[in-house]
Image (spheres, coloured by chain):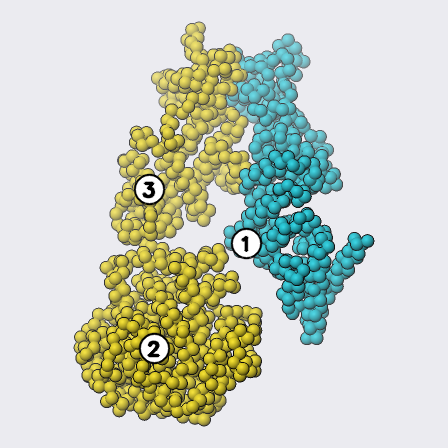
Chain colours: A cyan, B yellow
Amino acid sequence: MWAREREEREREMALDRRDSVSSAPWRGNAAGSLFFAAAEASRKLAEYVNSVIEALSTQNGRTLASLLAISSPNSFCELVASALELAKEPIKILKQVDKHAPLGDMLSNHTKCMHSYHQRRYVEAFNALEKSANMFLQEFRSWESAWAMEALHTIVYELRTLAQMADREMVANGKIPDKLKGAGSFLMKVFGALAGKGPKRVGALYVTCQLFKVYFKLGTVHLCRSVIRSIETARVFDFEEFPARDRVTYMYYTGRLEVFNDNFMGAEKKLMYALRHCHSSKRTNVRMILKYLVPVKLSLGTLPKEWLLQKYNLREYLNVVRALRRGDIKLLRHALHANEDGFLRSGVYLVLEKLEQQVYRRLMKKIHIIQKLKDPARAHQIKMEVIVKALSWLDISMDVEEVECIMAILIHKNYIKGYFSHKSKVVVLSKQDPFPKLNGRANIL
Amino acid sequence: MGHTIIAKCFQLFHQAIIYMVMDLQIIKVVIMATFSKASTYPPASVYSGPTGAWNNQSYNSYGSYPSYGGYSAPNSSSNLNAVSAQSQYQQECQQWADYYASLEPKVQSATVTSSAPGTEPDIPSAVSLCTSTPTYASVVAQGTSNNFYSAVNQPPPPGTQPSWQVPAPSHFETASQHLSSTTGTINNGSQWDTALMQLPVNDSYGQSSEHFQQVQNNNSLQQEQQDPLPSSQQDTHVTHIPEPSPSDHQKPLKFHSSVQQFTSLEASKQRMSKLQIPTNPRITQNLGVVISNGPKGALPDSSKPQKPAYISIRGKSSINKVSSDDIADATLQPGMFPPSLRAYVERALALCKDDAQKAVCQDYLKEIITQASCDGSLFSKDWDIEPLYALSSMLAKGISKQVAASVKLDSVSTRRVKSRWEPVGEKLEDIKDSIDADSSKTEVLEGSKGQEFAVSPKKWEKQETTWINQQQHHITSTKPSKRGGQKIKKPDPGTGGVGTSSESDTDLDQGGFHLGSLLTTETPEEKRKRQTRTKRFERSKEYSGPKGSTKPKLQGNASSRRASAIRLVMSVGDVNGQAVEDINWDSLTIRGTCQEIEKRYLRLTSAPDPSTVRPEDVLRKALAMVQSTPKNYLYKCEQLKSIRQDLTVQRIRNEFTVQVYETHARMALEAGDLAEYNQCQAQLKGLYSEGISGSYNEFTAYSLLYMVFQNVNNRDLLSSMARLSHAARQDEAVRHALAVRSAVATGNYTSFFRLYRTAPKMSSFLMDLHVERMRFEAVKCMSRSYRPTLPLSFMARTLGFSSLSLVNGLDEKESDGLEDCEEWLKTHGAQVVYESSTNELMLETKMSAATLFMPEPEDVVPHGDANLAVNDFLTRS
């Protein structure tokens, strides 16, 4: 019953918004219309303020969130911005909130932010929003229940995105960007307000994910650790109780962190979790997850089907996978070189680089198979010269010592079972399982 | 300390506004006085020896001031002196430093001739020196069409205080006398204000003409100094009487508001020479300030009333003016509030019926103007249509300020010309404004003058600080009396506010206003004297200063520099971060004068002393010396550090800087001093990013290697790899570094030690860092994968022990490698056996695999940094 009424009101407000957009052209045509516009703007602003008051008093978090949204396509930003420009005494109208809740200052800052945002002055907008957000957080702390979680999340999101825009603006103006950093420290405050026991903890993971985004952007990923610890060690709250969207994001980022730490097993686990829980319709998200999952899986010895790479437009991995299948060192090097910049930027270069040893292993396996066909009795002895010759067919020129070194490493790292005889220059493969499965191996050595 | 300064500045600003209001009144007084007292009016012009016309005019009243009789004769000669000197000054006036320097001795010479009876020699000197004032003013006027600039450039205001202490008493005495005489007329009108208001209306013609004459006298005086023709004076007088006089009663106010305006009118007739006028009053104002505020308590009460030598009081009002300029709109026309505002104030005051009302009205006006200048609407507001009725009705009831405050309109700031440090924060605005104005002053001075004025800015900084203090003093002393304007009605001629201190301050103020306004328009002598005092003050300052006049021009005064730096920082620090970037650090940067090539490194604990800092050319020699010296690294490192320090304190960042850091980085690498290397590398990164050229690729390679070997996290390594340009990747050193990274990543010891052997430049020194670990990994790998044994010769070759042998191709060397290898293997727990069949040492791999260990580093020291072990250090280098 209530909900329907509220919906209707929202629809009304949405209509209003459209009104204001369409009415924009005629404003300022004449003094009379200007006056009219001012009155109209005041009315709209008052209406906006009233709906905020309404949302506060009815504790309607969703409505409040939509009222406070700035960058979303149907936010009130434009309405408020134009009303602020035209209305005669916007402050007076905004101060009305004070009577109902101590959020008057917050709202005046928030509308100021909307105004600045509308005029694309992002640094100003960010500064205003930061003030607004601080005030809101103060209020939020005092509320027992978590009804305003959605609104808080909206503010957190807006603050982060706005900080990025503000930073871009600052860079364009030749200043040192520091807004995203500021947003990061504010998010940390929000996290502190949520991470404790109680009903508000549900919202903590969302803030964590936003923090990850900030830290990854800033390149200060080491700061993630404390947040992760707080999320993963807390026993009062089961991870599965967090919303799915936050869980997926969280696992994606922690998986990436594991990639940086060369912990491929952990990375695989987290990224697989993310992939499994990610909604299949969110193709870009799936692609983002796969972008890291594929190299991790490769290094663990699992090769993806080509159609998967095609489907999610991960062509950069196609040749890498082919090289792995064929044992073609040259192709791998070529693939790495061709996409070097992209791999370096996404951070998987070092992972892919280590695939070279797998390619050598594949090559050895192939030689072994061929020898087996020829002479099963002596198949486990692979002469150095054979390997060198095979490599030279692949246009890789290496002298015996280098190949020897690579073989030693392969044996050392357990890619190949066997030993190397320096005296006779022969790799002697183990008779049982000379090429052990890679699963669970890559991260040990 | 900072707080108090800010607070004081705030007061100052307020004060300025108040005085602006009062200023308007003074103008009236001036007009009235000049008008009514023309005959008895004894201007300070007595001093002006060369200007015959002046003397003629005022000598009739001269007799009543006996002490001055003695003055006139010697003065004339001294003035002549000064005048002749002055022509020289005019040419060199553009350079303040030189100007002052040259001025001083001459002044002294002049002083000798004119030591007056009964007074300190200071006074005559002041007199003679004052002749230069007009020139100064004219220079300013000519040099800059912008009046603000001239105001800023006025050197004397800040520093004069001490110097005039002695002469002050007599002047004040006379001033008070003057006051009594002038106020006598004022008292005639029962309603002072109304009288004022009416007077212009009634007699606007005569009055204004009279006044013009005064100004004109002033003009002609100045003119004469360039071309002394007494007769011409009369002409100018004549020409000025028909000056278009104000038709409405607003004029008197306006008139004073801009002597410039007035003179600009004249200038159209009289051409260049008149240009001097605009600045003159301002100078006297500034000087006057000091006089009226000084430590009067110390002034001896001289019993003899003397002729008013000069009028300080004018300065009183002027200080307000000046400061308000500085504060409210440093770049606008100096001291001038919009005429419409003046008219508005006048209208408001006209409505007042008695003193009480006036007081309230003034308060109210003060608030309005403060408000307006705060929010920037001072110049945008249309004062002509600003409602008066509200305040008039309020005044009638005598409503308190609070009510008045509510009437204020908070108009949106539209335009506000300010210093560029203008704070964004609104709350502290007014406070900062004053500071800002100050700092901007310094800024302008330093910025605009450039090198040749190297000395004067320094003086300025000092003066400015003292000036602030002074102003503070002024504020505090006059604050209680700021509404003294009403008392003007009944000044007590007896007290005169001369020698007595605080209680008579108010009277003094008022008296000051009268006299000042009466007289400032007159004599250039006045200014001359004031300037002398300033001069003297400056001189004493110089003597007392820590490194004053004894040091060469280039040497900065460290303490003053720091003081100004602190002030700058203070003025901007708490506003917002961006403003700090605007500080002109260039003006604070020192230039070294030390010529020693060698210098010990000492970590600075205070501001650098220029005498111990070497300029760049000496540093270049020092670098060359370091590069060629046969001494050990310890010595080189210290020398390089001191070079780096000198570069830093002088903020030299160019190719040479890069060269120094590169040299030090290489030497540090050679000596294995990683800490120093790291510092240099960090500095080089910044220098390169500023676009300063150097061995960029070489050091990129080093930093890559360093990152690889220091096990920085993958992300950092990746990002620095991603940042490499394609050009950089083609570079030999960078390619080598990348190959090394790859070898380390895959554990490929063969290629690592091959790369070790072929390392370009200093890369091998960095690779040394990793050799030990790489060898260990390699042996571990070998012992796991090779069976049953591995010849040591192969290992020595593969693990880089025998690099020398490859170069020389000598058996001896090769065996050396073998021995090293064997020893290394043994210390790491490997099992080495002798194979008799091949006469070779072999590694027993299976056994070794279990026993290999990494020994504790031998050169470990308790504090963890082997580089700090002095003995080791000395032997190494």
Residue B382 picture location, percent across and down = 55, 78
Residues flagged by tags 2 and 3 on a common chain: yes
Amino acid at pointer 2: Ser
Amino acid at pointer 3: Leu
The answer to whether A129 appears left or right of A24 in the picture is: left
Residues flagged by tags 1 and 2 on a common chain: no
Label disc, if present, on residue B640 of the rendered structure: 3
Vertically, is B549 above or below B180?
Answer: above
Quadrant of image for the N terminus of chain B: bottom left
Q: Residue at x 43, y 93 (%)?
A: B203
User: Residue B786 or B613: which is nearer the viewer?
Assistant: B613
- Chain to which the residue tagged by mark 2 belongs: B
Task: Give the residue number, with chain letter if any, for mark 2.
Answer: B504
- Nearer the camera: disc 2 or disc 3: 2
Residue B861 picture location, percent across and down = 37, 29
Q: Is residue A3 visible?
A: yes
- Chain to which the residue tagged by mark 1 belongs: A
Residue B658 picture location, percent across and down = 39, 45
Mark 1 surroundings: few (<14), some (14-19) or many (≥20) residues within 10 A: some
- Chain to which the residue tagged by mark 3 belongs: B
Vertically, is A150 above or below A445?
Answer: below
The answer to whether A184 appears left or right of B687 in the picture is: right
Label disc, if present, on residue A170 of the rendered structure: 1
* Quadrant hosting residue B130: bottom left
The answer to whether B4 appears left or right of B621 in the picture is: right
Quadrant of image for the C terminus of chain B: top left
- Find the distance from the CA under tag 2 to the CA under tag 3: 64 Å
- Find the distance from the CA under tag 1 to the CA under tag 2: 57 Å
Instruction: Say what secondary structure mark 1 lies in.
Output: helix
Amino acid at pointer 1: Met
Label disc, if present, on residue A308 of the rendered structure: none
* Quadrant hosting residue A68: bottom right
